[in-house]
């Protein structure tokens, strides 16, 4: 059976609006000419002229956090506990079975920036696509932010998933979710306004913090979700294994058997 693999990850890049100021990745590139000089240091007597095309290795040194680029957040990122008091698992402890499962796409591009998605919104979308959630399905959310990645307005664009909406998914056995926005929650600028009006700290990072009740992971900064059907695909999102870390980068892909 033919298989189509759709890349739903973003690249790590310099000098684009991928994160709030001061949180962006920084990549230093070593070109082949510089790599040739470095290579000669390891082989006494070797000169650059002796190397094919006078070239050595190309290499990059990257200054990034585990939450730059397309990445999987572990429950440890959200809080020190999960599942009502158990120690939250770190990224190297995430069950690999969670990371390769059938996918479901919820299309929330029509919601305004800063909107907080509710369980009723999820139910309406599931009814529209004719799907009943199954345990361990990976649910990805297509927001208005997906098309704005790298643009100055990317971080504050898109809707977010509220506490009740997140628990709606996790209480049905979903253990990995995802979004093409900067955060699973609503953009901070909108939450800050709500907090200023209400002084209700429970509104801050409410989707993330729901992991204290039911442990789960989510993928942030997905891409190209517009290319996916609502169902009928598999998501692979294995994270880089970093000891005791709160997240890990992933080359997330959607696989469609045709």
Image (cartoon, rainbow, N blue to C red):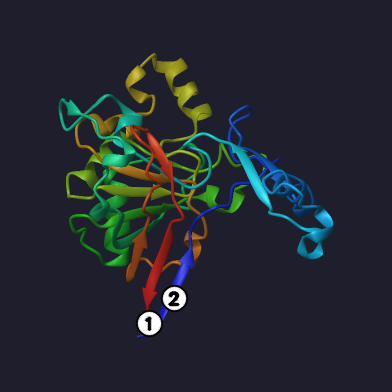
If you read the primary sequence from the N terminus, does the residue marked by circle 2 or circle 1 appear first?
Answer: 2
**Image quarter hosting the C terminus:** bottom left
- Say which residue label 2 marks: 4
Relative to 102, say whether 62 is above or below: above
Name which quarter of the figure residue 242 lies in. Answer: top left
Separation (CA) of disc 2 from disc 1: 7 Å
Residue 143 vs residue 222, the one in the foreground: 222
Q: Find residue 4 and report its horizontal and vertical position in percent.
A: 44, 76
Which residue: 60% across, 48% down? 149
Q: Are marks 2 and 1 in contact (CB under 8 Å)?
A: yes
Q: Position of residue 105 (x, y in %)?
A: 37, 59
Query: Which residue ends up furthest to the front in the rendered image?
Result: 45
Q: Position of residue 16 (x, y in %)?
A: 68, 42
- 48 in relation to 243, above or below: below
Residue at x 30% of width, y 49% of height: 176
Q: Counting other residues with Cα less than 10 Å from the Cα at mark 1, is it few (<14), some (14-19), or many (20 or more)?
A: few
Q: Residue at x 32, y 61 (%)?
A: 103
Which residue is farthest right? Answer: 49
Q: Outermost residue, bottom direction?
A: 1
Residue that label 1 marks: 258
Q: Which part of the image, by quadrant, shows the N terminus?
A: bottom left
The numbered dot on residue 199 is none
Of helix, strand and loop, which one carries label 2?
strand
Quadrant in the picture for residue 246: top left
Q: Which corner quadrant of the image does residue 133 belong to? A: bottom left
- Asked which secondary structure carries label 1, the reply is loop
């Amino acid at each position: 059976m033919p298989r189509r693999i759709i890349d739903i990850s973003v690249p790590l890049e310099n000098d684009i609006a991928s994160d709030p100021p001061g949180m962006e990745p920084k990549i230093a590139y070593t070109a082949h000419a510089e790599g040739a000089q470095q290579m000669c240091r390891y082989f006494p007597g070797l000169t650059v002229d002796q190397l094919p095309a006078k070239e050595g290795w190309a290499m990059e040194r990257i200054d990034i956090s585990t939450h730059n680029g397309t990445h999987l957040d572990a429950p440890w990122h959200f809080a020190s506990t999960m599942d009502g008091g158990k120690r939250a698992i770190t990224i190297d402890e995430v069950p690999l079975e969670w990371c390769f499962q059938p996918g479901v796409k919820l299309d929330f591009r029509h919601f305004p920036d800063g909107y907080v998605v509710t369980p009723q919104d999820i139910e309406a979308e599931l009814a529209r696509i004719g799907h009943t959630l199954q345990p361990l399905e990976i649910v990805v959310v297509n927001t208005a932010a997906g098309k704005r990645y790298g643009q100055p307005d990317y971080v504050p664009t898109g809707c977010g998933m509220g506490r009740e909406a997140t628990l709606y998914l996790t209480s049905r056995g979903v253990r990995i979710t995802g979004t093409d926005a900067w955060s699973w929650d609503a953009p901070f600028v909108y939450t800050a306004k709500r907090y200023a009006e209400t002084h209700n700290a429970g509104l801050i990072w409410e989707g993330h913090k729901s992991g204290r009740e039911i442990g789960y992971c989510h993928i942030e900064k997905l891409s190209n979700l517009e290319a996916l059907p609502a169902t009928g695909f598999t998501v692979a999102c294995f994270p880089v294994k970093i000891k005791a870390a709160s997240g890990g980068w992933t080359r997330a892909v959607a696989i469609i058997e045709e």
